[in-house]
Amino acid sequence: MTLTVLLVEDDRELRITLRDALAVEGYKVLAAASLADARALTANATREGGIDLVLLDLGLPDGDGESLLNALRRESSVPVIVISARHTDVPKIRLLDAGADDFLVKPFGVGELLARMRVALRHRGRVLRAAITYFEHDGLVVDLGARRVRVAGIDVHLTPTEFKLLACLVRSAGRVVTHRQLLLDVWGAEFTEHTHYLRLYMGQLRAKLEADPADPRWLITEAGVGYRLVEPLA
Ligand code: CA
């Protein structure tokens, strides 16, 4: 099955580079240089089987990509990956909380983009089927159903809060989860500003799981945004 990608990017050179790279990978690419183009293509594609993933630049000649994200989220759960030159963290967090699946800051490699796209597409498929309850990567095994965590074949004991935090990351493995989302899921709505809890518990998790907690293999920091458990390897 051919997957259709809507690519919204006003930088002509980057648009062509990405369009060609994605076409080589077998994606059908609808390329838009503005919000107006993107809206027209979206309306057309809806009649022709839809769009499977959106790559969305933020700074566009006729407005901000964020408005398209909000419009898409009102009517669909299509995966959206933001590609942006902006380095400030606040918009990233706001976009993720608004329903973007991931973000890439320019410049990025095509290999990294393809990997993020695979994760976003797989997660979207899983959301519709069943939740992720099992994670395995290079010696780390987390089985949420059995409440079991092993590193290199040895059971690791986690406190209930540590386990809950790890479980949130397993369910989104490969994707960044914002501080706010983690605090909301683990501690509840009253605690979404308590980022020091996260730092503390993430430190404890790393101390128990990582060979070198200062240079983690699995529990990756997304500076100013949140945390990402690496993509699982079967
Ligand atoms: Ca732009």
Image (cartoon, rainbow, N blue to C red):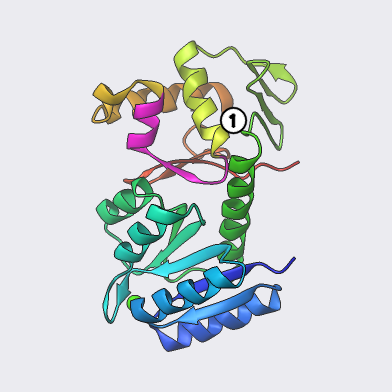
Q: Residue furthest front?
A: 47
Q: Is residue 19 above or below residue 74?
A: below
Q: Badge 1: how crowded within 10 Å, few (<14), some, or many (20+)?
A: few
Ligand 1: quadrant of the figure: bottom left
Look at 64% across and 76% down and name the residue there. Answer: 28
Q: Is residue 52 above or below residue 21?
A: above
17 or 80: which is nearer to us?
Answer: 80
Look at 75% across and 65% down and name the residue there. Answer: 1
In the drawing, does residue 113 fall left or right of residue 190?
A: right
In the drawing, does residue 168 fall left or right of residue 85?
A: right
Look at 47% across and 52% down and name the residue there. Answer: 101
Q: Amino acid at mark 1?
A: Ala
Where residue 189 appears, as percent x and y from the top left, is 29, 25
Q: Which part of the image, by quadrant, shows the C terminus?
A: top right
Where residue 61 appears, as percent x and y from the top left, is 28, 82
Q: Is residue 84 above or below residue 186?
A: below
Where residue 10 appears, as percent x and y from the top left, is 38, 82
Magenta residues, start to end: 173-185
Look at 61% across and 54% down and name the residue there. Answer: 121
SS under mark 1: loop
Q: Is residue 7 magenta?
A: no
* Residue where numbered disc 1 is placed: 211
Q: Is residue 180 magenta?
A: yes
Where residue 57 appears, as percent x and y from the top left, is 38, 70
Q: Is residue 31 above or below residue 174?
A: below
How many tags in the picture?
Answer: 1
157 or 52: which is nearer to us?
Answer: 52
In the drawing, does residue 128 fall left or right of residue 94?
A: right
Indicate if the residue with disc 1 has its beta carbon within 8 Å of ligand 1.
Answer: no
